[in-house]
Image: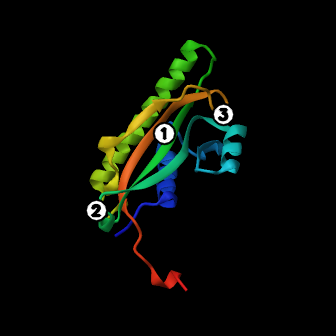
């Protein structure tokens, strides 16, 4: 069974950023996506930020169910940010609304991709009924405002591999 992990998840999000018309990662040289723990990508965005930016901001997990089931829930957090053209209430509200719309575009794409996914596709494990989002209270990057989406998905703990042990 294919399992979703941090690298495949970030590859997936990056590909969506390249495909979304309002994010357009790498179009015209502007950076609009950064992976978790990627200071060089954050620096590249800070130096040439696109109006709309997506950043994988956190990734964690925990065991669930009974021990013998070896189930776990992983959670990815993704920031959706939009540049505020003016640093007043109107500009910040417009940026926040744009970031929300982009975030919801991604949520609807997650749902479409999940519906289109095969039985063994890792996207089938997205728990879209359990997503949540929070407004970011402070500006990020170059006066970007927006939201942090929390996306949980279920998976299984890896099986014991005797080849890894001496």
| Point 41% across, 41% down: residue | 106
Q: x, y percentage for residue 54?
A: 54, 41
In screen coordinates, is 33 left or right of 104?
right
Residue at numbered disc 1: 21
Q: Nearer the viewer, mark 2 or mark 3?
A: 3
Q: Secondary structure at mark 1?
A: loop
Residue at numbered disc 3: 141
Crowd band around label 1 with a 10 angstrom C-alpha radius: few (<14), some (14–19), many (20+): few
| Point 48% across, 44% down: residue | 77
Numbered badge on residue 118: 2
Q: x, y percentage for residue 9?
A: 47, 55
Q: Are marks 3 and 1 in contact (CB under 8 Å)?
A: no
Q: Earlier in the sequence, mark 2 or mark 3?
A: 2
**What count of labels does the image hold?**
3
Crowd band around label 3 with a 10 angstrom C-alpha radius: few (<14), some (14–19), many (20+): some
Snapshot quadrant of residue 70: bottom left
In screen coordinates, is 71 left or right of 28?
left
In screen coordinates, is 12 left or right of 81?
left
Q: Secondary structure at mark 2?
A: loop
Q: Are marks 1 and 2 in contact (CB under 8 Å)?
A: no
Q: Secondary structure at mark 3?
A: loop
Q: x, y percentage for residue 33?
A: 58, 45
């Amino acid at each position: 069974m294919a399992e979703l992990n941090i690298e495949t998840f970030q590859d997936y999000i990056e590909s969506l950023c390249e495909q979304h018309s309002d994010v357009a990662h790498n179009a015209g040289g502007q950076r609009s996506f950064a992976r978790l723990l990627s200071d060089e990508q954050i620096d590249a965005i800070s130096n040439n930020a696109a109006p709309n930016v997506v950043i994988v901001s956190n990734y964690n997990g925990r065991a669930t169910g009974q021990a013998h089931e070896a189930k776990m829930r992983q959670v990815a957090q993704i920031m959706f940010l939009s540049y505020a053209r003016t640093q007043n209430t109107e500009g910040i509200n417009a940026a926040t609304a744009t970031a929300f719309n982009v975030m919801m575009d991604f949520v609807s794409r997650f749902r479409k991709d999940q519906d289109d996914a095969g039985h063994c596709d890792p996207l089938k494990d997205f728990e879209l009924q359990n997503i949540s989002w929070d407004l970011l209270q402070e500006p990020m990057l170059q006066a970007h405002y927006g939201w942090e989406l929390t996306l949980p998905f279920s998976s299984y703990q890896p099986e014991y591999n005797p080849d890894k042990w001496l």
